[in-house]
Structure formats: structure tokens, C-alpha cells
Image (tube, grey):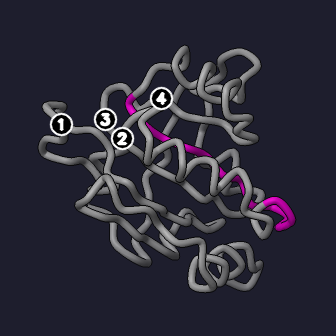
């Protein structure tokens, strides 16, 4: 399980920004700055929809250069594409269909609503050295993260060339 200041293994996952499917490699984005990874159980579930819309509306993320936001769940790119379209999500959603990245990050529920291995609701910031700068997760998929100063500071720190 990845903790603060641990390195994250590079990964390549299918995903969509709502306009077709692509492969997304972590290092392609950390080479240019930092990444905010938002993991969540399922597209279209009530709390997941609320949380993803909060990220859609988070001004400090939209106006911070060299920070890329990605959502990650086990859902397919087809579900992600519809989710993006319905809720106007402005960042790519990645499909961790095998649960490899979810497991690497230590963010899989043993079981949640009769589904094994789905991602916990979590936020992880990864800097340009592919090091975890911030990690928040919850055992309750009904709990929402706050987009507070601590997250903003971690994003900015992960985006600092001197880090």
C-alpha cells in the first residue's frame, strides 16, 4: 500500500475525456507537473456524482497550471463517457478494470455493496517525481472529501519545481 512520500509505479490505463477512448500513462502527466487522482466506487452513484461534480467546480484546480485531474474507478470507458457527457466532467476518467492501480494504492474495499475490490473514495496527489504528496481515503463510500487548504497546499507543493 502506497503511503505519503512513497513512489507510485507508472501505470497505463484506458480512459476517456468524453471524446473517444485513449490510453493514459501516469508518467506522461507527472513529467509535466502533478496529478490529482480521484478514486471512487461507481459512475452514477449518488455520492460519486456529487463528489465528481465538486471536482468539476473546484476553481483552484482549474486555474493551477501543470496539474492534471483524473477520476479512476473500475467502470468501463463506455460508462465513463456517458458520465462525462451527463455531468460535464472536464477531466478524463480512467478504467482500472483489473483493479491493479487501486490495489497498488491500497484503496480497494474488500467488499462494498456486494462488489469486491472497488476503489475507495479517495484523493491522491502525485508530484513530478511520482511521489505521493497527499492521500485521503475513507472506509465509508458515503463520506465526501473536502476540497480544503490542505489539498490545495499539496497540489501546489506537488507542482513546485523544487520538490
Residue that mark 3 sits on: 99
Question: What distance separates the C-alpha of mark 1 from that of mark 3?
Answer: 17 Å
Residue bearing the label numbered 1: 113
Q: Residue at left 31%, top 27%?
A: 98
Circle 4 — which element?
strand
Question: Are dots 1 and 3 in contact, CB under 8 Å?
Answer: no
Of callouts 1 and 3, the N-terminal one: 3
Q: Is residue 70 magenta?
A: yes
Q: What is the x, y in percent for residue 160?
A: 75, 80
User: Which residue in the protein does label 4 denote?
Assistant: 95
Quadrant in which the N terminus appears: bottom left
In the drawing, does residue 36 fall left or right of residue 38?
right
Residues at badges 3 and 2 in contact (C-beta under 8 Å)?
Answer: no
Q: Which residue is mark 2?
A: 41
Q: Residues within 10 Å of mark 2 (few under 14, many from 20)?
A: many
The mark that comes first in sequence, 1 or 2, is 2
Q: Residue at x 60, y 79 (%)?
A: 148
Q: In this rendering, would 101 be left or right of 92? A: left
Q: Nearer the viewer, mark 4 or mark 2?
A: 2
Against 144, is 5 above or below?
Answer: below
Q: Earlier in the sequence, mark 3 or mark 2?
A: 2
Amino acid at each position: 500500500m502506497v503511503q505519503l512520500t512513497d513512489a507510485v509505479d507508472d501505470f497505463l490505463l484506458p480512459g476517456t475525456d468524453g471524446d473517444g477512448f485513449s490510453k493514459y500513462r501516469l508518467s506522461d502527466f507527472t513529467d509535466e507537473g502533478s496529478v490529482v487522482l480521484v478514486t471512487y466506487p461507481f459512475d452514477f452513484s449518488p455520492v460519486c456524482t456529487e463528489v465528481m461534480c465538486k471536482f468539476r467546480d473546484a476553481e483552484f484546480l482549474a486555474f493551477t497550471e501543470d496539474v492534471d485531474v483524473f477520476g479512476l474507478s473500475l467502470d468501463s470507458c463506455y460508462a465513463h463517457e456517458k458520465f462525462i457527457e451527463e455531468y460535464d466532467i472536464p477531466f478524463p476518467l480512467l478504467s482500472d478494470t483489473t483493479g491493479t492501480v487501486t490495489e497498488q494504492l491500497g484503496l480497494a474495499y474488500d467488499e462494498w455493496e456486494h462488489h469486491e475490490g472497488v476503489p475507495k473514495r479517495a484523493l491522491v496527489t502525485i508530484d513530478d517525481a511520482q511521489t505521493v504528496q497527499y492521500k485521503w481515503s475513507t472506509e465509508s463510500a458515503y463520506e465526501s472529501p473536502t476540497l480544503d487548504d490542505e489539498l490545495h497546499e499539496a497540489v501546489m507543493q506537488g507542482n513546485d519545481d523544487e520538490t
